[in-house]
Image (tube, coloured by chain):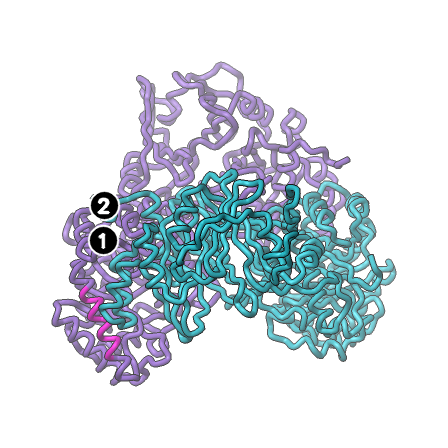
Chain colours: A purple, B cyan
Amino acid sequence: MSPELPRLSLATVCVSGTLEDKLEAIATAGFDGVEIFAPDLVADPLSPAGIGDRCRDLGLSVDLYQPLRDIDSTDPERFAANLRRADAAFEVMAGLGADTVLVCSSVSPDAVGDPDRLAGQLHTLAGRAHERGMRIAYEALAWGRHVDTWDASWRAVRDADHPALGLCLDSFHVLARGSDPAPIATEVPGEKLFFLQLADARELSMDVLSWSRHHRLFPGQGGFDLPAFLAPVLAAGYTGPLSLEVFNDVFRQADPIRTAVDARRSLLALAEEAAARGAGTDPVGTTPPAPTGTAFVELAAGPELGRVLRALGFSRTGVHRTKQVERYEQGDARVLVNAAGADGSAIAAIAVESPDPAASARRAARLCAPPLPRTTGPGEADLAEIAAPDGTSVFFCRTDGGTGTDGSGPVWSHDFVATDEPRAAGTGITGIDHLGLTQPYDAFDEAVLFHHSVLGLAPIADGEFAAPFGLVRSRAVADEARRVRIALTVSLLRRGEWSPAVADPQYVALATDDVLATAAAARDAGVPLLPVPANYHDDLAARLELPAELIATYRELGVLHERDEHGEFLQVCTELLGGRLFLSLVQRTGGHDGHGWADAPVRMAAHRRSRIGRAAVPV
Amino acid sequence: MSPELPRLSLATVCVSGTLEDKLEAIATAGFDGVEIFAPDLVADPLSPAGIGDRCRDLGLSVDLYQPLRDIDSTDPERFAANLRRADAAFEVMAGLGADTVLVCSSVSPDAVGDPDRLAGQLHTLAGRAHERGMRIAYEALAWGRHVDTWDASWRAVRDADHPALGLCLDSFHVLARGSDPAPIATEVPGEKLFFLQLADARELSMDVLSWSRHHRLFPGQGGFDLPAFLAPVLAAGYTGPLSLEVFNDVFRQADPIRTAVDARRSLLALAEEAAARGAGTDPVGTTPPAPTGTAFVELAAGPELGRVLRALGFSRTGVHRTKQVERYEQGDARVLVNAAGADGSAIAAIAVESPDPAASARRAARLCAPPLPRTTGPGEADLAEIAAPDGTSVFFCRTDGGTGTDGSGPVWSHDFVATDEPRAAGTGITGIDHLGLTQPYDAFDEAVLFHHSVLGLAPIADGEFAAPFGLVRSRAVADEARRVRIALTVSLLRRGEWSPAVADPQYVALATDDVLATAAAARDAGVPLLPVPANYHDDLAARLELPAELIATYRELGVLHERDEHGEFLQVCTELLGGRLFLSLVQRTGGHDGHGWADAPVRMAAHRRSRIGRAAVPV
């Protein structure tokens, strides 16, 4: 590793399992070091020296032992007992081979409020550590009794004035309180910054302790501006590891290797972004992605899907040279139908247009995106293929007709032999509006970070809605120009035994400038459109005061209609085409930037009805 | 139904599914009526009249249609549009056959702040309803823009002064804000109380909107004093239904029939408790339970468990007349080992001593506890048997030696033929301290209410701890005298694919006055005691400053030691005996009232190690 590149560490609290599981996962993900959380060590059968040896065998340094709580005390006897506790921690650290311990500001009723006395006690503690060649990294908990901001912790460290005493800065504690991190750059000397813990979080209105202990996220998954936090810390001269300390209920019970890989991707992307703002060294070293469109969507589906696409006005423009794949096109919407191994329809792949597909693939590899093995026939395009967290394949393709061997059309398209079928007139579909992908429960936050850092699709909207069979959380990601959009959803609670909902639904939303015309043409051609209950349209008419004639058309075609301050979002869905896939026709007006979440519960109930083949009126 | 008994209603928002699923579940659970939540109706294919017919076919009256939001407005045009929305709701209600609609206080920026103007607009609205023979039940949302307390909503209703306008009181909105409900009894005339919605909740420090929309509970499952809320409402003269409006993330995705039964049990128990305090009529009509001890615990397990019990100093005192069941005893600890169908050990049943078992069984039936079919051989005791939410059987037995046919010992014991084996000396076990039962994810809150209302075991402690494979929530229930204790636990998130933890662990904690002597004797007799890591005892020594000699004994025996302000809790666990069952030896001093949750993560990691047979030191 280049010496200027940051060392990356992960706290054992971030991942699930026993200490042994955690260390294996952290090493597998390629981290340089680890923070050992004391309760993980206490439950482990290995001695501290044995754990230290295990870390070194795995290529991990023990960058921090944590935490030592409630050290200072207004009661001299209690303070003496606390120092004995600290000595026991130093003994553990000697075994581990760790030289830095995290000391949190006290939350105890006997915490020292007087600044001079606190500085004195911290000086004493640092002296004990110094005798053993160790260091104290002092951190302000956001809910500390007297010390609860980074500047209060800095005043205590400065006044204590001991070479073995420095600061630990935790982005959560700083940003959750709305403190400005910028002055760190000038107020704190770099050599006094002993450790740096990074965590993101969604904005939640709950007490900060619960927020901190349950809902932290890896940088890039929440709402904090982490680059703006990291930059002043690096500017101050911090040279230690970038470490993540993320308490998260979901990560605590998820596959630890997967979580650790997600964590490392997060740190790499954060350091890259900070470097782009002039702070520190970029460890990724590639150009951030700039997707320029969707080259194609590949559906794993039987021939009946091809019939639906034709009825929707698509033309079958090509047949794959070697595989059971057909190419359908209308406007800028390109859909491949892959009949191989399709038992039930699903979105198998999305191809994102990139100005430099090879560079995009290199970037994905550096950001720990798992590459997929690919068999390419003679003369076929060698497309880089990676796996998204939900298992969907992602291809990178050239936008501008980077050409195949015969010089015409984009490379990927040259795997197809053109059909001699006449072009269909079409129904007004102009392209792909967005994809809807249900995420595996444990991978939702990972997916948001993956799409942003690897594909260049940033979060643009968050939602939560009460679906008939449980709450659903949603997050949409898109490029700046909205050329590529994906709506990610997940059940708020992992589904149990009673789950009559359509499992893991997926859809392709097709764009049209006149959804009423497109849907009418599709219906006339036999596309199975999803019936929408009359109650919905009665309610819509009452809410939006729409003309009766329009409502009548809506009823006929099953139009779902959302309005916000920008414009309108009109949508017509097909029935399920296979177990969980459907198509929808989407018209946006006035810059509406939504994804149909307000109407999703109605749509989900309707899809469930059609799936179980229940009569509209039960008898 | 007796006319004085309260009518019981359930809001469709309380249960999972489409409206059709919900109505079926609510009827199956035996409710009298239903609140129809507008979004449930909007997604349903039946017309309002069809839904009304369906309700009546199911024996349900439509007691409320809800909600109508943001009616009043400072903008006259907006107010006119809102009245048109209200007319549409009246039209729906006419179809449903509902005469009362819930109107929430407005949260909109254009909400009317001036009391006279608000009263005027509510008067106008009530007039429109009155023309159609309908009524407005006006409710203060706790986060309403101007009207956010019950007394503010009452002032508005009083000032509007229209016979078709009354109050809806929701216990959540009142109690979450800490308002005193007592003055309702004298300030509000009964005929102005149009509707009553009941909900409980845990104390959580989060914004009240999120708390209300995600974490409500059925009465008896949370921390609110619902009888103290219900009493003044009934005293005021309210005669309408008792209805539950509970937004809960878990209930939203759980089996709706099960949730509806839980809901009805909750209302019955609440009405019973209010009646005991002199308000309203008791719909249960039995004596509340007063458990006086644990008659026995029955384990489904093979003969190896009998060997462990003997090594623990138990005597085999009886063999069942007709079944493969053996009875073991030591002190007041009575354990049955049932070899029938045992593939893996588990707690099959608990027998609770009751002064009047038949009355306890009648009570359980009135509180919707599912009875279990039971085959009784000739001459065998006919014990009433019901199923707890986790599937464990519960028996009710006579305490006082209510005798069998030959006049000796309690009835249940007469199914056993006494062995002629000599009584073992014992190891100091005096009885059963408590049981540990992991609950199914969806049934945790239901279990707490079941144990309280049906068995008389009230919640005494709540906890949450970070176990190696995810967070665990815990709740202990016990009788006042602590003669029967059960520790209920559940994973905070339903476990996914990566779940190397011991699944659904269960244990029987056996009481002793000297755990060191009992554990040493057990170890010497070959009981497989669970090794506890040296790091745990090093940490314990540092934390509690215990003498080295004691720590050495702790290490040998694997003692877990917790201390609180009352006293000490010492515990020694066995290895797993089968896939998920273990025994523990527990000593309490100084009135410690805990259940070993602080040390549970260490114990769980140790059990996982022993379960997967991993060597203490990995190679």
- Quarter that holds the C terminus of chain B: top left
Subunit bearing disc 2: B
Magenta-drawn segment: A80-91
**Can residue A167 be seen from the camera position used here?**
no
Q: Percent position (x, y) of residue B610?
A: 32, 47
Q: Which residue position is annotated with label 2? A: B618
In this picture, residue A416 sits left or right of residue A5: right
Give the label on residue A46, or none: 1
Residue at 80% across, 69% down: B123
For label 2, the SS is: loop
Residue B176 point in image, percent of width and height: 60, 70
B221 magenta-colored: no
Instruction: Say which residue appears at 29% left-offset and 52% top-offset.
Output: A19
Q: Main secondary structure of the magenta part?
A: helix
Chain ID at mark 1: A
Residue kind at label 2, given as amino acid type = Pro
1 and 2 marks in contact (CB < 8 Å): yes
Q: Residues within 10 Å of mark 1 (few under 14, many from 20)?
A: many
Judged from the image, the secondary structure of the residue bearing numbered disc 1 is loop
How far apart are labels 1 and 2 at the CA level? 9 Å
Residue B114, numbered circle: none
Vertical placement of A533 versus A374: above or below? below
